[in-house]
Image (cartoon, grey):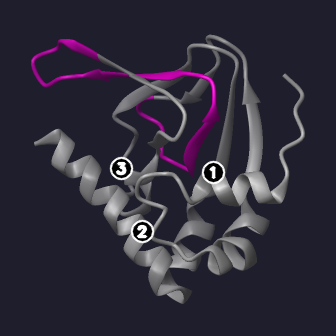
Amino acid sequence: MEQLITAEELIEFLGSVEGLKEIPVEDLDAFVLPLISIATYEPGQMVIRCGERGTHLHILYEGRIRADVETPDGKMNRFVMEKGAVVGEMALVSNRPARADVVAETASILLSLDIETCQSLMVNLWPVTRAFAGLVGRRLANRA
């Protein structure tokens, strides 16, 4: 799944992701893009492991991933996500372990920012703070 992704393609993509499109293009280009790492995952490969401390915010660039979340009554809920999905955002505000296993269902490309970098961006750039807070807010609203 080797693929060269240009900076222009990344900026266009990030500008389309719900929760990140509020970040001005010039901030994405100057401050966010240089800090993103790109990783490929094979089908079945673990992205986030339930019970482990979150270390990265991930954005699905290509492929399909799923989150398997156990409910308080012991049932398993499965959420399948496609291009533009964001996972790991709760680690921005919580030092708690991940509540779900996130696994690549197909060969996938994920863009990642480590949590310390995200927090530093939040301290220094108000548009990033607002965008990341929105990601967390959406996740909390979906849990309710």
Residue 109 horizontal side relative to residue 123, left or right: right
Question: What amino acid is labelled 2 in the image?
Answer: Ala
Task: Kindly identify which residue carries mark 2.
Answer: 131
Question: What amino acid is labelled 1 in the image?
Answer: Phe
* Residue 8 image-quadrant placement: bottom right
Residue 17 horizontal side relative to residue 97, left or right: right
Q: Nearer the viewer, mark 2 or mark 1?
A: 1
Residue at 38%, 75% in the rendered image: 130
In percent of width and height, residue 39 lies at: 76, 37
Task: Name the disc covering residue 96, or none.
Answer: 3
Tell which circle, 3 or 2, labels the residue nearer the N-terminal end.
Answer: 3
Residue at 50%, 28% in the rendered image: 82
Q: Is residue 115 above or below residue 142?
A: below
In percent of width and height, residue 81 lies at: 44, 27
In percent of width and height, residue 51 lies at: 41, 33
Provide the residue span drawn in magenta: 50-77
Helix, strand or loop under label 3: loop
Distance CA(mark 3)–CA(mark 1): 29 Å
